[in-house]
Amino acid sequence: MNIKVLYHSSIKIESNINIYFDPFKIEVASNDADVIFITHEHYDHFSPEDILKIKKENTIIVLPKNMENMALDLNFEKTNIVLVEPNQKYKLENQELIFETIPAYNVNKNFHKKEMNWVGYILEIEGKRVYVAGDTDITEENKQVKCDIALVPIGGTYTMEAKEAAELVNIIKPKIAIPIHYGAIVGNKEDEKIFVKNVEKDIECKILL
């Protein structure tokens, strides 16, 4: 698989299908998304104009249950809308894609409240487990994640800051850690350096932003 961090928390995974997470600031319309995963409704994660740049006729959109009307407003067919809740496992039959939802929320600030039921995702793809954390702090739930690749926010203010993100990575011990959610709205190259410095040496850090 080919993982790209396009901008901020906007991610594309190219495998046998094209998978996007939280598309944002898409430069060129490609209309090539097979599946779009949305972690929550904030403008930098659910961006209608960017979703429409990658949406094609049969694109499936996966998003928290309280966002159904937002997907319908973008003319997704009901049959192509998958509504999710935290702590569940799902299978997209027509794409042969299995994924889990992990709660994503703040523990010491109020931007992402647990009761909103927003999520991160673990995809099972090409024999690997890929964790996209969403906007979150370290939580009891995400400390239990088992994955091969972890994409975690490091920008602070709204999510974990760099040292906290490294702490989570050191707890869950993926083979590869990829920092996201920095370089635009919050966070910068200094946060990236702090993250890399604090991740244990047996975990490979990949900088894709």
Image (cartoon, rainbow, N blue to C red):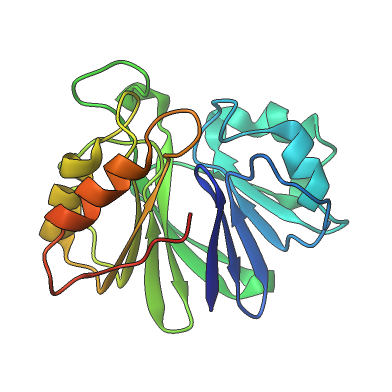
Q: Quadrant of residue 57?
A: bottom right
Residue in view at x 25 percent, y 18 percent: 109
Looking at the picture, does residue 5 appear above or below residue 157? below
Looking at the picture, does residue 51 appear above or below residue 206? above
Between 120 and 203, the residue placed more toward the observer is 203
Left or right, residue 154 beside residue 194: right
Residue furthest top in the image: 110
Q: Position of residue 35 (x, y in %)?
A: 67, 59
Q: Position of residue 91 (x, y in %)?
A: 53, 65
Q: Position of residue 2 (x, y in %)?
A: 55, 75
Q: Quadrant of residue 95?
A: bottom right
Left or right, residue 14 beside residue 184: right
Residue in view at x 67 percent, y 73 percent: 17
* Residue 51 visible in image: yes
Looking at the picture, does residue 36 appear above or below residue 34? above
* Residue 144 visible in image: no
Q: Where is residue 142 in the image (x, y as percent from the top left)?
A: 23, 48
Q: How many labels does the image show?
A: 0
Residue in view at x 85 percent, y 38 percent: 75
Left or right, residue 7 beside residue 107: right
